[in-house]
Structure formats: structure tokens, C-alpha cells
């Protein structure tokens, strides 16, 4: 099953009402539900299968037929430049509150920039990428099997590592996105293993050598980028992300940077998990 648009009476893919509002309708896939967090390894594995199938089914699709709806969406250089611009204009009180986050940025930026630059240089295959593969963008059926990816408005040309990295960031984090006790934040390697098993079961033989060699580092890159975005928004007085209390974006950034550090610490372990999965079949 896949999400399919229902055409308008005139054959269009959307309808504009008299108030200038845009509407579209999609076929219902019955008997399905979504999850907000992973509760067991089986769900992580099924999530990996869903993303793997998404990429496998879209092999051979003419990538140039897709528009880039969000330019530089996962560009670390762009997000870093936005951070520096915000830092130059930020209120001193906010900068003082974010001293530890600024130190984290200074430590991790040089470690992750080389992978970002390789992606932007085109060292990896250009693919159809979902760009928002968190678990609540996957439909599950009553048996707990992943049915398909949903929320396709960020689908555009890109790098597979962005999808795998962001999926691990959201699926294998031990704590909520805005956890204030950072001692609870870590990468759950059991969920990482399960997700990788599901994903590579679909994509093992379809990855380039460069993609396979960088699967372990990709989650750190994406986690760092999201942390940059949260912290930049905090410096910008919370203009972009909806917040529920004054320091919400600062806490979100702290979680991402803590998780990114843990992923970097665990690179040897993550690669040891991936190697047999990449070779089996």
C-alpha cells in the first residue's frame, strides 16, 4: 500500500476554495495507526524496513523530476552560518544561558563538517529522500508491521545518509526531545541494531560503498544539525519552533548535542554492529 492522491473532478491534485485555501485528499489505508516513540526493538526493526522499502521502491525514479521544496534543509554549513548570524545579534542573557551549548558546537563542528562537505560535494548517490523519517511518519497495521511511510511533503532529491541519520536520531534516543535530565540521554544501541537490521534487509545490496562506510556517523551529523537549529532558534527568541515554556528550545538543543556526543563516542561499537549486517544476506 502507498499513499495516493485523490484527483479533483477536473483532474487536479489539489483544490483551491473561494478563500484561497488549498486542499488535497488522499486514499485511506484502513486499520493502521502511528507511534510517537519506539517501545520495543520489533518496532525499531519495522521502522527500518519501512524506510528501506521506501528507498528500494524509488530506485530508478528520475530524481530530477522532483522539486527542491526546502533548499539546504540538511546543510550543516547553512545551519552553522545561520547560527553565527543569530549569535551576533542575540541578547547577552540568552548567550550566557547557552554557554555549554556553544562549547558543544565548537567541539563537534570540526568533527562532522568533513562528512557534510562530502555530501554537498556529491560524493554520494543522489536519491529520492524522505527527509523526515521519524517513527510517527510510518503507518503500522494491527499486527505491528510497518505498512508505508507517510507525510511526504519533504520528499526531494538528497542523500540517503540524511534519512538514515535522522531516523536513528529519533528512533534510538533513550529520552524525549526536550528531556531536562541529560543523564538520561543516550543512543540505545539495541534500537540502533534493530533499525539497521530492518533497513539493511531492504537496502544492503543497493548501497554504494561510500554510503555503507558512513552509516555509523550519519546519525551524529543529523543530530548535530537539529541541535544547531534548536539553539539558533533559541538565540533568535524562538521564532520558528513552537515552544511550551521559555527555555524549551535551549533544552531541546542540549538533548541533541548530548545525543550527538554519545553517538560519536560509540562509533567503534556502531561500526561493529553494522559490519556483519552489511555482509550478511
Image (cartoon, rainbow, N blue to C red):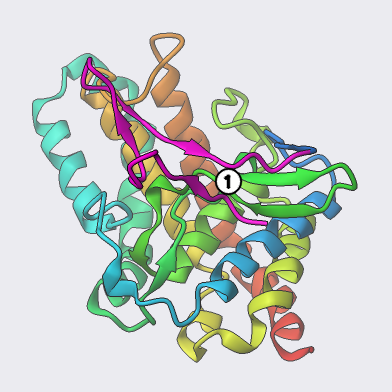
Rendering quarter of residue 95: top left
Which residue carries the number 1 mark? 134
The segment highlighted magenta reads 1-30
Residue found 30% across the figure and 77% down from its top? 118
Residue found 64% across the figure and 68% down from its top? 53
Work out whether 48 lies above or below 251: below
Q: Position of residue 207 (x, y in %)?
A: 55, 84
The outermost residue toward the right is: 143
Work out whether 178 lies above or below 262: above
Q: Position of residue 280 (x, y in %)?
A: 79, 89
Work out whether 274 lies above or below 279: above
Q: Position of residue 198 (x, y in %)?
A: 74, 67
Q: Position of residue 231 (x, y in %)?
A: 33, 32
Dominant secondary structure (helix, strand or loop) of the stretch shown in magenta = loop
Taking 15 as reference, is 173 left or right?
Answer: right
Taking 120 as reference, is 226 left or right?
Answer: right
Residue found 33% across the figure and 55% down from its top? 74
Q: Residues within 10 Å of mark 1 (few under 14, many from 20)?
A: many
Amino acid at each position: 500500500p502507498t499513499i495516493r492522491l485523490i484527483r479533483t473532478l477536473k483532474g487536479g491534485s489539489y483544490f483551491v476554495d473561494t478563500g484561497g485555501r488549498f486542499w488535497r485528499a488522499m486514499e485511506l489505508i484502513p486499520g493502521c495507526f502511528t507511534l510517537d516513540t519506539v517501545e520495543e526493538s520489533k518496532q525499531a526493526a519495522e521502522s527500518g524496513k519501512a524506510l528501506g522499502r521506501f528507498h528500494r521502491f524509488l530506485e530508478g525514479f528520475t530524481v530530477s523530476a522532483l522539486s527542491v521544496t526546502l533548499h539546504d534543509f540538511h546543510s550543516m554549513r547553512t545551519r552553522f552560518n545561520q547560527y553565527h548570524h543569530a549569535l551576533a545579534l542575540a541578547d547577552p542573557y540568552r548567550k550566557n544561558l547557552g554557554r555549554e551549548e556553544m562549547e558543544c558546537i565548537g567541539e563537534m563542528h570540526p568533527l562532522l563538517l568533513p562528512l557534510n562537505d562530502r555530501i554537498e560535494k556529491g560524493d554520494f548517490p543522489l536519491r529520492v529522500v524522505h527527509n523526515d523519517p521519524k517513527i510517527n511518519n510510518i503507518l503500522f497495521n494491527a499486527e505491528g508491521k510497518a505498512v508505508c511511510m507517510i507525510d511526504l511533503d519533504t520528499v526531494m532529491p538528497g542523500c540517503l545518509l540524511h534519512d538514515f541519520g535522522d531516523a536513528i536520531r529519533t528512533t534510538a534516543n533513550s529520552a524525549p526531545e526536550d528531556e531536562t535530565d541529560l543523564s538520561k540521554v543516550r543512543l540505545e544501541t539495541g534500537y540502533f541494531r534493530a533499525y539497521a537490521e530492518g533497513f539493511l534487509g531492504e537496502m544492503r545490496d543497493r548501497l554504494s560503498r561510500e554510503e555503507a562506510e558512513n552509516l555509523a556517523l550519519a546519525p551524529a551529523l543529523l543530530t548535530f544539525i537539529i541541535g544547531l537549529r534548536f539553539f539558533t532558534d533559541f538565540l533568535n527568541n524562538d521564532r520558528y519552533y513552537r515552544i511550551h515554556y521559555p527555555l524549551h528550545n535551549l533544552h531541546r538543543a542540549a538533548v541533541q548535542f548530548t545525543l550527538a556526543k554519545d553517538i560519536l563516542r560509540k562509533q567503534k561499537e556502531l561500526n561493529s554492529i553494522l559490519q556483519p549486517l552489511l555482509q550478511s544476506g
